[in-house]
Image (cartoon, rainbow, N blue to C red):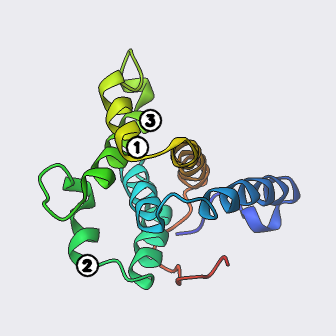
Amino acid sequence: MDARLNYFGNAVAMKFVKYINSAGKVISDSSLPAATQELVKIRASQINGCGYCTDMHTKDAAHRGETPLRLHLVAAWREAKVFTDAERAALALTEQGTRIADASSGVSDEVWANARKHYDDEQLGALVSLIALINTYNRMNVIIQNPAGDYQPGQWG
């Protein structure tokens, strides 16, 4: 299976990716915990059916020390005892922020208030930005049908 478009051979696409990667660096350098960042990327990618991003972020998380048990339970985080209350709040915000079109009210006040209990303003800014960013990457990869499975941890820096 080949992607519909070679992003790396397309000047416009690569210029766009360069800019959003710069935005991603701001988030990764923030005080939002790295483990939480990976969980958010994985969960949004699962919801959006982005195999490429799910492959990438589960491998990156494992490479950084995330346990197989937690990686296997991200999709069922509500029933899993392995996530902190703060991680649960981030995952709930990720789900509602990713499924905006599915809810007439977008992100509920309850989910937002729960996230606010666990994260300061800088971390919330990073979390909201991360949810928006991973959804962008997911959409790009799903649209071009970028195949999953070949990613190696750290491949993109």
Can you tell which quarter of the image residue 43 is in? Answer: bottom left
Residue type at mark 2? Pro
Residue on which the image places disc 1: 94
**Which residue is depicted at the point 69% across and 62% down?**
25
Label 1: how many Cα within 10 Å (few below 14, some 14–19, many 20+): many
On residue 68, which mark appears?
A: 2
Nearer-N-terminus badge (2/1) = 2
* SS class, disc 1: helix
**In contact (CB < 8 Å): disc 1 and disc 3:** yes
Of helix, strand and loop, which one carries label 3?
helix
Q: Quadrant of residue 94?
A: top left
- x and y, in percent, of residue 15 in the image: 85, 56
Q: Quadrant of the C terminus?
A: bottom right
Position of residue 52 in the picture relative to residue 118 (left or right): right
Instruction: State the separation of the CA atoms marked 1 and 3.
Output: 5 Å
Instruction: Please report the residue visible at 47 percent of the width from the left and 60 percent of the height from the top.
Output: 37
Q: Nearer the viewer, residue 134 or 52?
A: 134
Kind of residue sitting beneath label 1: Thr
Per the model, the C-alpha gap separating discs 2 and 1 is 21 Å
Disc sitting over residue 97 in the figure: 3
> Residue visible at 38% across and 15% down?
104
Compare marks 3 and 2 and give the one earlier in the sequence.
2
The foreground one among 114 and 73 is 114
Estimate how packed mark 3 is, as few (under 14), some (14 to 19) or many (20 or more) residues with alpha carbons within 10 Å.
many
